[in-house]
Image (spheres, rainbow, N blue to C red):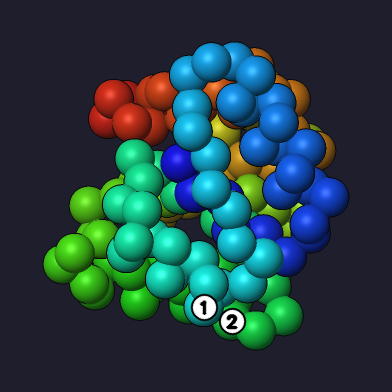
Amino acid sequence: MLIVDDEEAFCHLLKKNLEASGEFKVFFAHNGQDGMTLAHTEQPDIILLDVMMPDISGAEVANILKKDEKVSDIPIIFLTAIIKKEEIGIEPMRRIGEYRYIAKPIKTQALIDSIKETIQGKG
């Protein structure tokens, strides 16, 4: 799994919580360019991608990755503080267009469930 988010503390905490479940090996990058490089080198099962980053937006990263046949099949879930939990409703994850979104703050078990659903093609 790859996390791409410019908030370092958030990445470290998320990595710790997800790896503690024993189900994931987590890599992370703090900017879009490094995230795209890691997507190529690590070939993760899924990418958790922040929408707002200083160098390149999450939407731009997703568009670039989806046009690259080496990584285009990797599912992406956007993590965002832009969309509030109240806007998403009771479900932890919501699909907008072809992408899935999870509002920050994120509850670990809900995120794990959403990741599993997405990897299995159900989300």
Which residue is under mark 2?
A: 56
The quadrant of the rendering that contains the C terminus is top left
Which residue is under mark 1?
A: 33
The type of residue carrying mark 2 is Ile
- Secondary structure at badge 1 equals helix
Q: Which quarter of the figure has residue 93?
A: top right
At 59% from the left edge and 81% from the top edge, which residue is drawn? 56
Q: Is residue 109 left or right of residue 38?
A: right
Q: Position of residue 109 (x, y in %)?
A: 64, 17
Q: Position of residue 4 (x, y in %)?
A: 59, 58
Local packing at callout 1 (Cα closer than 10 Å; few below 14, some 14-19, many 20+) is some
At 25% from the left edge and 60% from the top edge, which residue is drawn? 71
Residue 44, visible in the rendered structure:
yes
Q: Nearer the viewer, residue 11 or 97?
A: 11
Q: Marks 1 and 2: CB-CB under 8 Å?
A: yes
Q: Nearer the viewer, residue 113 or 20?
A: 20
When the figure is inspected, residue 56 is found, relative to residue 38, above or below; the finding is below
Q: Is residue 91 left or right of residue 59?
A: right
